[in-house]
Image: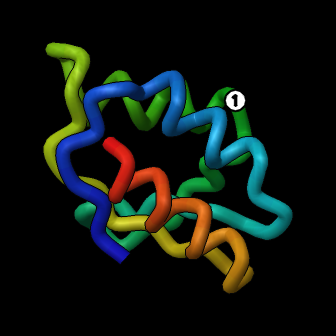
Amino acid sequence: MKIQNINNVEKFFQVVDSCVGKVELVTGEGDRLNLKSKLCQYVSMAKIFSDGTISELEIIASEPEDVKKLVNFMMEN
């Protein structure tokens, strides 16, 4: 799933942390980074944005309820 225009990065990570299954960031090279890992969050986000906004991410959530959480986050923000 593609997530766009994340303005509240802290809230985004709160949603990711609340997910029960895996949430992975798909890099441009096709690698998958575990977004529930704090180290991966810092490393991946430092490379993706520098102005406080994330224009687009491709992520994979393994559980249907986690997909709903992420979609709700996108709709609210």
Please indicate whether residue 50 sits to the left or right of residue 26 in the image.
left
Locate residue 13: give its quadrant.
top right
Residue that mark 1 sits on: 38
Neighbourhood count class around disc 1 (C-alpha, 10 Å): few under 14, some 14–19, many 20 upward: few
Closer-to-camera residue (75/23): 75
Q: Residue at x 51, y 65 (%)?
A: 32
Instruction: For the C terminus, give its image quadrant.
Output: top left
Give the mark count. 1
Disc 1 element: helix
In the orientation shown, which residue stands out farthest toward the bottom? 64
Locate residue 34: give its quadrant.
bottom right
Closer-to-camera residue (8/23): 8
Q: Residue at x 35, y 22 (%)?
A: 46
In the orientation shown, which residue stands out farthest toward the front? 76
In the depicted structure, whether residue 64 falls above or below residue 42 = below
Q: Residue at x 58, y 74 (%)?
A: 67
Q: How is the image coloured?
A: rainbow
| Residue type of the residue flagged with mark 1 | Lys
In the depicted structure, whether residue 6 falls above or below residue 69 = above
Closer-to-camera residue (40/15): 15
Q: Position of residue 15 (x, y in %)?
A: 63, 44
Instruction: For the N terminus, give its image quadrant.
Output: bottom left
Locate residue 39: give its quadrant.
top right
Q: Position of residue 74 (x, y in %)?
A: 36, 55
Please indicate whether residue 37 sits to the left or right of residue 4 in the image.
right
Q: Position of residue 66 (x, y in %)?
A: 67, 69
Q: Position of residue 3 (x, y in %)?
A: 30, 60
In the depicted structure, whether residue 15 falls above or below residue 38 = below
